[in-house]
Amino acid sequence: MVAAVVSVVVVGELAMRRRLRLARATAEQRDQTHHAFGVLLAARSRFTHAVAAYEEAVQASELRTSAVVGAPMGPGGEIATPSPTLVDAERAKDRARDELLDAQRLWAASREIDVDQADPDPALWTGRGVLVAGNLGPIGWERATIRLTHLLDDRCWVVVRISRPRLGLAIGAEWQRLAIAGAGVDSDGLKSLLGVAFAGTEVAVRPGFTPARSWRRFRRTEPTRTSLKHQLREARLAAVLEPRSAELSDTLRHTFEAEFGQTLTSSTELGLDRGLLGIHTAGPSLVVGAWGGPKPKVTVELSSDHRGWNATA
């Protein structure tokens, strides 16, 4: 049993770290400033090589000029009709110079992009994640990795890691897929709500019937239950950190509009006096016992250029 618990935790953590590395690499490729810098470096390299090739062609042409007796000379001392190699080298140098100028303009434009944007309105959020946890008697550990995205603007997103030790008396392990919905708080407040949601104590006998979770799903409307299925389906390890699909975005928007009873636009007033957060889970779990723990640590791993993600959680 101990070996099984440790294996679940270790394998889950290593797999998620690998996915995070891939997500970071993908985010860097999509980042306009990072892309522009790469284009600039490549253009500089091509221009340097083109200039070197042109200078070599000039030197070779001068050697041929000195070797050819009685060749017609131009006013500058060069051969009146340049060699094809020299002509091609000069054209390549000119093309490389133009590409470098274009790359410099792209780099300058990318640095003017607002990297401290305000959150979109209204404050509505969705998320998918994976939680891996294990308990070995009086101590345990849990870590959730979640990608949160604004309901109406896929460009506003964040990947957070939530972790804490479990203290109590329990044994077992679990690997849960998470479906999350939030409303009424900005991005910084959303991180705080997540810290509260993953805090507190819990008593579990899993597998088994969990009345509270079943009741939460049962009392939801049909659009909400449908969107939960879609979210949990996309919360697989292979896809949980990827951008939300267009199909899921449409489904979630329909669900929120059904819940709030109105069409949602950037000018919609929600009329909420406090932040709301709902988390639903699905996945294999074999845990028996009770546990609590300190306040979870919420760490931003990746995010869009919105100021709320950069505040201290």
Image: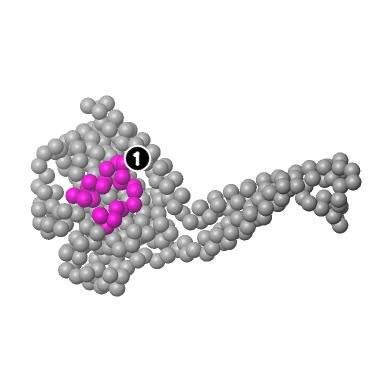
Name the residue rendered at 45%, 63% in the picture: 116
Name the residue rendered at 34%, 40% in the picture: 16
Read off the residue under disc 1: 16
Q: Position of residue 302 (x, y in %)?
A: 40, 51
Considering depth in this image, is 199 or 305 the residue closer to the camera? 305
In the image, what residue type sits under mark 1?
Met
Query: Which region is colored magenta?
Result: 229-249
Q: Is residue 126 visible?
A: no
Dividing the picture into quadrants, the one containing residue 187 is bottom left
Q: Is residue 92 visible?
A: yes
Work out whether 135 lies above or below 302: above
Classify mark 1: residues with Cα within 10 Å, few (<14), some (14-19) or many (20+): many
Considering depth in this image, is 192 or 74 the residue closer to the camera? 74
Q: Is residue 202 left or right of residue 66?
A: left
Work out whether 127 lies above or below 15: below
Q: Residue furthest right?
A: 70
Q: Position of residue 14 (x, y in %)?
A: 36, 35
